[in-house]
Image (spheres, helix red, strand yellow):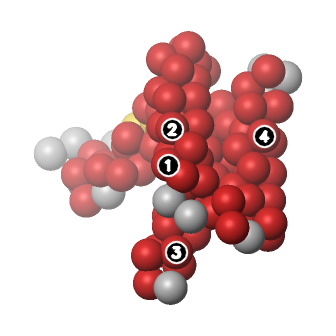
Amino acid sequence: MKTEAIKNRGIDLTYAEQRNFPFLNFYNKITAEENRYGTIVMALLIMVAWGGLTVGWGALTNAWQLAAIVFPTVIGLAFILAVAPMKLIVNTVIFAIVVDCIIIVMNLLA
């Protein structure tokens, strides 16, 4: 096995560390600038569709839930339009999806 450090788009990992942390390798691939257009399409599809499902499953009854869904989604869309760095876009999309999941669970349990 190679033990030399492999520069993997921002995070230095040895070969053994890459095998132990496959999520970091995936995260580095989707935040790479050369994968920008494919990542943006997937982010738009997942973020907007999941936000729409969240609104449809009960977030229309509370204004704060609707605001909690809309603000991260719109911020993510603004970063995409502003051609922001991919790490910022991906982190915002992940945050918006996590907020949507939390609100869906809240509405299903209520």
Which numbered disc, 2 or 4, marks the residue that appears first in the sequence?
Answer: 2
Q: Nearer the viewer, residue 94 or 55?
A: 55
Q: Are marks 3 and 2 in contact (CB under 8 Å)?
A: no
Which numbered disc, 3 or 1, marks the residue that appears first in the sequence?
Answer: 1
In which quadrant will I find the N terminus?
Answer: top left
Q: Are marks 3 and 4 in contact (CB under 8 Å)?
A: no
Which numbered disc, 3 or 4, marks the residue that appears first in the sequence?
Answer: 4
What type is the residue that disc 1 sits on? Leu
**Where does label 2 land, which residue?**
49
Which numbered disc, 4 or 1, marks the residue that appears first in the sequence?
Answer: 1
Q: Is residue 98 visible?
A: no
What distance separates the C-alpha of mark 3 from that of mark 2?
Answer: 17 Å
Which label belongs to residue 74?
Answer: 4
Q: Would you call the spot at circle 2 few (<14 residues within 10 Å), some (14-19), or many (20 or more)?
A: few
Q: Are marks 2 and 4 in contact (CB under 8 Å)?
A: no
Which label belongs to residue 107?
Answer: 3
What distance separates the C-alpha of mark 3 from that of mark 1?
Answer: 12 Å
Question: Left of 78 or right of it: where is 23?
Answer: left
Which numbered disc, 3 or 2, marks the residue that appears first in the sequence?
Answer: 2
